Image (tube, rainbow, N blue to C red):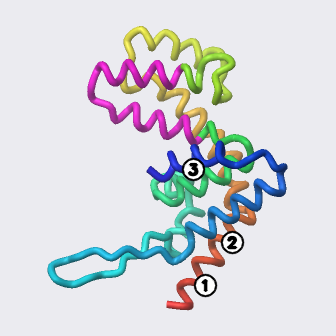
């Protein structure tokens, strides 16, 4: 999963200050946008397939946070942006909740609920998200018998924070402008 790669790569970057970190993010985005093609077989013919976001993809991300998060590269790039703002825990929590809601096994549900609580909800959690007391209390109560909606209220609040704060900054950021320019440049070269 691309997001998992995004969340693990920050640990590999030595603490070199804000400017060096910003440069590292730009390098990662350039690598993502580089022409990456894979050969696949379809019958007896070989086809080149590009796995980069298109101009249409990048333009759709500006329409809504839903559009951005529903696209594999959009989610990864938004994660990179949130890392640069030191708020990546929000998208990581949202993704963990999406995965949790899709879980069918009761045992897995309990395990994932506890992991999400320990990682994002608990006071002093490593990636604690900003939630009010009542929402946290409701989650603690639901941990006794976790269900698919145990984190729904918290997920909606975090989504609202991203939609109203982080997402508009992302759309107006140099990173997004660079993505648009790179995608348009590729279309003109094709």
Label 3, on which residue?
Answer: 6
Q: Earlier in the sequence, mark 1 or mark 2?
A: 2
Q: Earlier in the sequence, mark 3 or mark 2?
A: 3
Q: 26 above or below 137?
A: below
Kindly report the distance in space between the C-alpha atoms of the residues bearing marks 1 and 2.
Answer: 10 Å
Label 2, on which residue?
Answer: 178
Residue situated in front as seen by the camera: 14 or 165: 14
Residue 165 belongs to magenta span:
no
Residue situated in front as seen by the camera: 172 or 76: 76
Kindly report the distance in space between the C-alpha atoms of the residues bearing marks 1 and 3.
Answer: 25 Å
Identify the element where label 2 is drawn: helix
Label 1, on which residue?
Answer: 185
**What residue is at 20 percent from the left and 77 percent from the top?**
42
Identify the element where label 1 is drawn: helix
Where is residue 9? Give x, y as percent.
60, 48
**What residue is at 57 percent from the left and 50 percent from the top?**
6
Give the quadrant of residue 132.
Answer: top right
The range drawn in magenta is 91-117
Asked if disc 3 and disc 2 are in contact, CB closer than 8 Å, the reply is no
Where is residue 64? Give x, y as percent.
56, 56
148 lies left or right of 125? left
**What residue is at 37 percent from the left and 11 percent from the top?**
145
Q: How many marks?
A: 3
């Amino acid at each position: 999963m691309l997001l998992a790669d995004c969340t693990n790569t920050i640990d590999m970057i030595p603490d070199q200050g804000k400017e060096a970190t910003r440069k590292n993010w730009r390098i990662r985005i350039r690598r993502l946008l580089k022409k990456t093609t894979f050969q696949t077989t379809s019958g007896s013919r070989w086809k080149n397939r590009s796995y980069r976001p298109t101009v249409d993809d990048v333009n759709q991300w500006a329409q809504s946070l839903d559009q951005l998060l529903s696209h594999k590269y959009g989610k990864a790039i938004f994660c990179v942006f949130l890392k640069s703002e030191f708020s990546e825990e929000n998208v990581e929590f949202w993704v963990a909740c999406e995965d949790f809601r899709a879980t069918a096994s009761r045992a897995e549900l309990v395990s994932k609920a506890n992991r999400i609580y320990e990682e994002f909800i608990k006071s002093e959690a490593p990636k604690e998200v900003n939630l009010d007391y009542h929402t946290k209390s409701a989650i603690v109560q639901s941990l006794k018998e976790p269900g698919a909606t145990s984190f729904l209220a918290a997920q909606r609040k975090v989504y609202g924070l991203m939609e109203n704060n982080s997402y508009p900054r992302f759309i107006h950021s140099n990173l997004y402008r660079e993505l648009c320019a790179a995608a348009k440049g590729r279309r003109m070269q094709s």
